[in-house]
Image: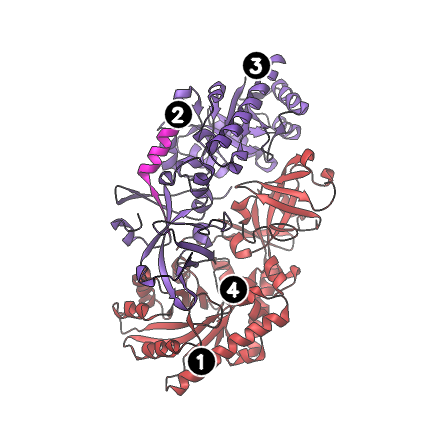
Chain colours: A red, B purple
Amino acid sequence: MATAEFTKDLCTPALIVDLDIVNRNAQAMLDRFQKFGVQLRPHMKTHKTLDCADIMTGGSRRCIVVSTLAEASLYADNGYDDILYAYPLPFDKVERCAELSERLSLFHVLLDNRLALRELKKRPLKQGKVWRVWMKLDCDNGRVGVPHYDPASLQLAQEISETAGVELTGIYAHCGNTYGCKGEEQIKAVAQNTTTFTLQFMEKLKAAGMHSPKSSIGSTPSCSHPVPDMAMLSEVHPGNYVFYDVQQSLIGSCRLEDVAVRVLTRVIGHYPHRNQLLVDCGWTALSHDGGGRLPTGYCIIEGHPDLKLLSMTQEHGRVESISGKLDFSQFPLGSLLSLMPYHACATAMMHPVYFVHSKGKIIGTWKPTRGW
Amino acid sequence: MATAEFTKDLCTPALIVDLDIVNRNAQAMLDRFQKFGVQLRPHMKTHKTLDCADIMTGGSRRCIVVSTLAEASLYADNGYDDILYAYPLPFDKVERCAELSERLSLFHVLLDNRLALRELKKRPLKQGKVWRVWMKLDCDNGRVGVPHYDPASLQLAQEISETAGVELTGIYAHCGNTYGCKGEEQIKAVAQNTTTFTLQFMEKLKAAGMHSPKSSIGSTPSCSHPVPDMAMLSEVHPGNYVFYDVQQSLIGSCRLEDVAVRVLTRVIGHYPHRNQLLVDCGWTALSHDGGGRLPTGYCIIEGHPDLKLLSMTQEHGRVESISGKLDFSQFPLGSLLSLMPYHACATAMMHPVYFVHSKGKIIGTWKPTRGW
């Protein structure tokens, strides 16, 4: 890809997105869960653009997850609806959530504690609307959520469903613990546990006489290798899969051929006395995510398995050879290298514009939203 | 600061900048080099805003360094001049550099090799202008530059000064190796070496019969603790000092009281079963810079030396107690914490807007430029 004709006119560093791979990844996820009879509610946090959201929703512009209100507003302002703000309700943003709830036909919030519920009660919605609330359940991931085994989880669900002006819309679990997996078998074991704990909790709700809210679990690894029991869930909510990255390939979610993004960079210096070359990609273009722990450092340098991105400063990357002397004649000053990022979410976040290509041509740009 | 009245109305996470500390840091650097009789050419890369550039230049809007052409354009479009693009000339950006050279009264480029010089020759400037070229000298920093001890350094300088349409304007060295120092004594040793190597090189130029170009060295540590010989340089070019950060305090460039920026964050979750609380600051608000290796993790949590920012995901930060059980009653849901960043350049880069305060009040916002 680095040698494709279109790349030579791009100013570097540049984030380039392969539209054909994006379409393939998005379609595969849509197909996978259509077969399961489970609603896909794709997460927008990786790209934060309108164009990619259209692709991930199959053009419906409905049923998405966001990680910030900046994303929620971008989508709400552009004809999207049924937006789930899957973030533990921040008390400073209740008013903005209320406005989105009143304006959209479906805007959902998430919480895992009683005080957040009290904040919602303090701000009843106008126009006879009710707050759509998802309760976050922690199924051994250990970030947000009431532990699934804790009796407090059932109590909180009960309290939500008994509160006037509030509806218990769903139960939400994130299986971020799939990120510690190596290979399909381990991923499926975590997916199974998360599914089992979530479904058991749904049974408890039923036994306690509560109406049946929706259930949703997600992470790119688990949704790339779903287990059959996931067919009993209402929804899933992966996000990274549209781009994938080196990390996902190491976990076993995808092959390297499925990674849709690269940072294009140019050689800007030759330093034979220390066997290094410099590229114009620092942490402002790639991020420090992954900590440089790959055998090839902070990324994979496409087509050059013997090169390592050793370190970065703000605008410079130091590249060296894993073994032996660098052949500098292979990498003339001004020539291009294509970096496959460790973590696409972190790399995309560094770019104010993404360059989209298809069949060897740049066909447009995508502009992400930023902030909160 | 976290408890200051003004913070309670800010949506979090937010980058807040203490204008009084910024003014003090900027003035101290201006005064220090005025006494030395050396021109301060402040670097804009840390903040990338117009407002802060005004402060760092003492209102002159002249004589600055930038790390990207996006910065160069921002400043050129807003009345700034005498701009040094201190980055090894990228061959894809020669035309943009030429336009800036033709448009401004002084726009400087930098190079460390003969091929870059050839690129400049291929694009002669209009209006009888000449390319203003700084040659990068590597004084044992090991990033960009011709090694100071290498005869090729003198040859390249000679070639630049003999090229028609090109002027050897200066010799530029970055003492980034001060970032490995602990304390004033070590910083001064590196500052002395860099200064000595640079001045020796200036002598060689003179002996070779070349006119006297300018000389400039810089880094925040060395310019915070300059050695007397630096008075023999023409310029210095530090940048980070206007904000400083935890890293600079550990190097010995500043005290913690000199750090001008914080990330303001809110408590969004209590998890007593794992002795952790969650805050709404992930790597999108702080960056992963520093790798979490501080005793307090990825930052210092102001006023709470016993707290550690253990890990971050995209929008979440996990905080725990360094010793013993967390007293959750001290950190109610919705309450604020103030994080002092490890690396201000990396943290500022994550924010589309900075909130500026003085004497307990928010007095405005600064908007940085992004991209390249």
Q: Nearer the viewer, residue A45 or B247?
A: B247
Left or right side of A204 for B178? right
Queried whether the magenta region covers residue A171, the answer comes back as no
Q: Which residue is mark 4?
A: A239
Discs 2 and 1 lie in a common subunit = no
Q: Amino acid at mark 4?
A: Gly
Q: Which mark is residue B32?
A: 2
Dot 3: chain letter: B
Q: Which mark is residue B211?
A: 3
Q: Label 1 near label 2: C-beta < 8 Å?
A: no
Separation (CA) of disc 4 from disc 3: 60 Å
Residues in magenta?
A: B14-31
Q: Residue at x 55, y 80 (%)?
A: A229
* Furthest residue toward front: B324
Dot 1: chain letter: A
Q: Which structural element holds mark 4?
A: loop
- In the picture shown, does residue B70 fall above or below A293? above
Q: Amino acid at mark 1?
A: Phe
Dot 4: chain letter: A
Separation (CA) of disc 2 from disc 1: 66 Å
Q: Position of residue A121 (x, y in %)?
A: 27, 71
